[in-house]
Amino acid sequence: MAKFRGAVVVDAEKCKGCDLCVVACPAGVLSLAKEVNGKGYHYSEMARPEACTGCANCGLVCPDAVITVYRKNIQ
Amino acid sequence: MTVETIDIIREENLVYRKTPALTDNVMHYCPGCSHGVVHKLVAEVIEETGIREQTIGVSPVGCSVLAYNYLDIDWAEAAHGRAPAVATGISRLHPEKYVFTYQGDGDLASIGTAEVMHACNRGENIVIIFVNNAIYGMTGGQMAPTTLVGQVTSTTPYGRDVKLNGFPMKITELLAQLDGTGFVTRQAVHTPLAIRKAKNAIRKAFENTKKDKGTSFIEIVGTCSSGWKMTPVDANRWMVENMFPKYPLGDIKDI
């Protein structure tokens, strides 16, 4: 059981769907949505929120700085 | 969103968010562009070291010509390639300020070669951030001096031919030989580890400005997924396989 649980908040309207955060996530939490935002991009979203540890790799690699990461110690 | 996830999204659990030194404007860059990450790193370093009011950036001509829309600091705009010359003037008039230029490879390695060479040779107390994506991104993917041998661009449709177009220019190694430079390094921003290293290099460069250690030059090997005609993820892979053998990462000079 993971010691930390994390949560990722993506600003969907600013996301350009570049897929870099999806690749950077070591836990496979993120994926691109089937829906598109106002500009027609498949934005990133948490597909498996239970696997997130809040490592913030997605936030680091995001070129548009649209990702906010939270982490909580659950032990 | 599960109830538990909502429970985690609280201000006290925050670990990463957009730095206040970046404006809320949506960047005009293509999806996955390295410029976004580099802008973010510069903004984070400026914010974390508390020098936002003392920093003056000089933006180039190229995709990052609009950098002043995204970093909430003072900016000047230079003619194509002339950012180091403009930065020289600003730095000499305001020696207490942190002055940096932000340039691409079409700007710095081609039309601005003379300016960057002589600014570095004079040892101007500035930081030069050089984003090398081996192509002219803004104008439609033409060959740049840094384009790899055999690389297909819109002006070298059969690949760069050394007999016709010469060899790729390793400008960072050239500048490291000049006595005026104090810190010369080459970084990348394709993985979280590389991004952390690049951020440390940018922080060190700004600290060197305070210590008056000469010109700090940071090359960041980046991607141009639109110019290379790849997805951002494929562009990162292509960069690792093809760019890194020619442009190896690491510190080249550190005095």
Image (cartoon, coloured by chain):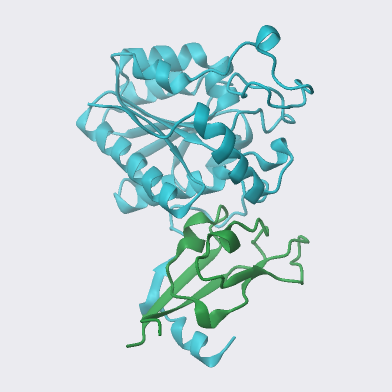
Chain colours: A green, B cyan
Left or right position of B107 against B118: right
Q: Quadrant of residue B81?
A: top right
Left or right position of B33 against B250: right
Residue A32 is situated, as x and y percent measured from the top left of the image, at 68, 67
- Out of B194 and B26, give the one closest to the viewer: B194
- Out of B30 and A28, give the one closest to the viewer: A28
- Residue B80 at least partly seen: yes
Q: Is residue A56 above or below residue A70?
A: above
What residue is rendered at 77% in x and 72% in y? A35
Name the quadrant of the C terminus of chain B.
top left
What residue is rendered at 64% in x and 39% in y? B224
Q: Quadrant of residue B186?
A: top left
Residue B152 is situated, as x and y percent measured from the top left of the image, at 73, 27
Residue B220 is situated, as x and y percent measured from the top left of the image, at 47, 36
- Residue B43 at least partly seen: no
Left or right position of B39 against B13: right
What residue is rendered at 67% in x and 11% in y? B165
What residue occupies the far bottom of the structure in this picture?
Answer: B3
Q: Is residue B188 above or below residue B24?
A: above
Q: Quadrant of residue A13?
A: bottom right
Q: Is residue B217 above or below residue B167?
A: below
Name the quadrant of the N terminus of chain B.
bottom right
Q: Is residue B122 above or below residue A63?
A: above
Residue B88 is situated, as x and y percent measured from the top left of the image, at 38, 20
- Out of B225 and B234, give the one closest to the viewer: B234
* Figure label count: 0
